[in-house]
Image (spheres, rainbow, N blue to C red):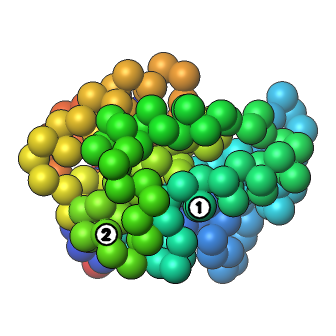
């Protein structure tokens, strides 16, 4: 697990957004390779899962509806193995959302929305997880669950996390510190 730290405005979120292809670098480019072959940008979204507090998810759907939609999109892409509903449900249960999976996202608290993003990202089966301040809006118990979950999956996933939280920094294997202006 790789940690990116730095003062406010140092570029942590921008770096993750560049890595996710949400924004394009000016000047320059970001290229991705698997076994020496360039991966086209339009296929990257099926390899990466991105979670950030500022990320929006559709409020007019329930978590279960979003899961089913995501599974359908993954199946259509043919790039990632489609995860079972049980895989998503297991993560929802871990974060305490199993009893709320039929509730509309608009009725979720801020912390519950963050957990719903985890369910969608981690349940997707994608090999790369980009996490921008993942513990934001979580209570202490949920933060501990998240950190243990990340540690449990750090050998099988490429995890890049931007954070300044000491508890999150402590679980990283490598640290990149960005200087600010």
User: In the image, residue 80 lies at what x, y percent?
Assistant: 77, 39
Q: Name which residue lies at 44% across and 26% down.
A: 154
Task: Say which quarter of the image contains residue 51.
Answer: bottom left
Vertical order, 98 against 11 (above or below): above
Distance between mark 2 and mark 1 Cα atoms: 14 Å
* Depth check, front residue: 30 or 1: 1
Element under disc 1: helix
The disc, 2 or 1, on the residue closer to the chain's N-terminal end is 1
Label 1: few (<14), some or many (≥20) within 10 Å? many
* Depth check, front residue: 176 or 21: 21
Vertical order, 179 against 139 (above or below): below
Label 2: few (<14), some or many (≥20) within 10 Å? some
Q: Name which residue lies at 36% across and 38% down.
A: 93
Q: Name which residue lies at 12% across and 42% down.
A: 141
Vertical order, 103 against 64 (above or below): below
Q: Is residue 30 visible?
A: yes
User: In the image, residue 101 lies at what x, y percent?
Assistant: 43, 54
Q: Which residue is mark 2?
A: 108
Element under disc 2: loop
Across the whole image, how many numbered discs are drawn on residues?
Answer: 2
User: In the image, residue 15 lies at what x, y percent?
Assistant: 49, 63
Relative to 93, 50 lies left or right: right
Query: Quadrant where the C terminus lies?
Result: bottom left
Relative to 34, 1 lies left or right: left
Task: Say which quarter of the image contains residue 152.
Answer: top left
Vertical order, 51 against 168 (above or below): below
* Depth check, front residue: 151 or 94: 94
Q: Which residue is mark 1?
A: 66
Q: Name which residue lies at 78% across and 56% down.
A: 73
User: In the image, residue 179 lies at what x, y percent?
Assistant: 30, 64
Q: Is residue 178 visible?
A: no
């Amino acid at each position: 697990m790789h940690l990116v730290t730095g003062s406010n405005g140092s570029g942590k979120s921008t770096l993750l957004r560049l890595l996710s292809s949400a924004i394009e670098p000016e000047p320059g480019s970001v290229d991705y390779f698997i076994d020496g072959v360039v991966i086209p940008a339009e296929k990257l979204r099926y390899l990466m899962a991105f979670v950030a507090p500022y990320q929006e998810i559709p409020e007019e759907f329930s978590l279960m509806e979003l899961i089913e939609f995501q599974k359908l999109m993954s199946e259509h892409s043919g790039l990632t193995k489609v995860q079972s509903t049980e895989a998503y449900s297991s993560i929802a249960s871990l974060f305490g959302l199993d009893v709320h999976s039929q509730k509309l996202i608009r009725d979720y608290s801020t912390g519950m929305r963050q957990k719903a993003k985890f369910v969608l990202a981690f349940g997707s089966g994608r090999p790369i997880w980009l996490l921008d301040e993942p513990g934001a809006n979580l209570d202490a118990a949920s933060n501990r669950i998240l950190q243990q979950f990340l540690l449990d999956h750090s050998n099988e996933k490429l995890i890049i996390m931007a954070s300044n939280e000491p508890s999150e920094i402590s679980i990283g294997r490598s640290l990149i510190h960005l200087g600010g202006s």
